[in-house]
Amino acid sequence: MAQLFNMTTDQILNYDGNIPKEVIMEDKTVVEQMRLIQELDEEDKQTVFRIIDKILTNKKFKDFFNKNIATL
């Protein structure tokens, strides 16, 4: 878990932040993918996150466009 969240075990055991009431990890493949992304060098990691941001921005734009076209 420490590696997944890029924290030390001490940071996890003595966590001072807000603790979620419920954490569900349904898709272990996503967790594994995140672990592998964290192992990339910084440039590759940033490339992956830029691609994800671009896809999410496109989806938000399409959703916004479809919602506003529907009101015409």
Image: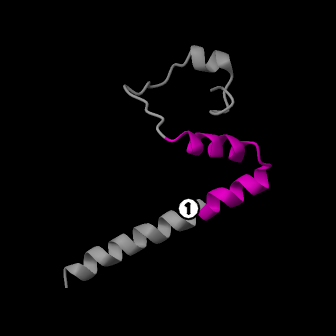
Q: For the view shown, which residue lies furthest in the right direction? A: 41
Residue density around tag 1, few if under 14, some if 14–19, many if 20 or more, within 10 Å: few
Looking at the rendered image, the quarter that the N terminus falls into is top right
The region drawn magenta spans 27-51
Query: Whole-percent x and y of residue 39?
Result: 76, 42
Determine if the magenta segment contains residue 46.
Answer: yes
Query: Whole-percent x and y of residue 29?
Result: 58, 44
Determine if the magenta segment contains residue 15.
Answer: no
Position of residue 46 relative to residue 5, above or below, is below
Q: For the view shown, which residue lies furthest in the bottom direction? A: 72
| Residue at (57, 14) in percent of width and height | 14
| Residue at (69, 30) in percent of width and height | 3
Q: Amino acid at mark 1?
A: Asp
| Residue at (44, 68) in percent of width and height | 59
Query: Whole-percent x and y of residue 72?
Result: 19, 85
Residue highlighted by disc 1? 53
The overriding secondary structure of the stretch rendered in magenta is: helix
**In this rendering, position of residue 39 left or right of residue 5:** right
Query: Whole-percent x and y of residue 51?
Result: 62, 64
Residue toward you, 18 or 65 = 65
**Secondary structure type for disc 1:** helix
Position of residue 22 relative to residue 41, above or below, is above
User: Which quarter of the picture shows residue 50?
Assistant: bottom right
**In this rendering, position of residue 34 left or right of residue 26:** right
Q: For the view shown, which residue lies furthest in the left direction? A: 71
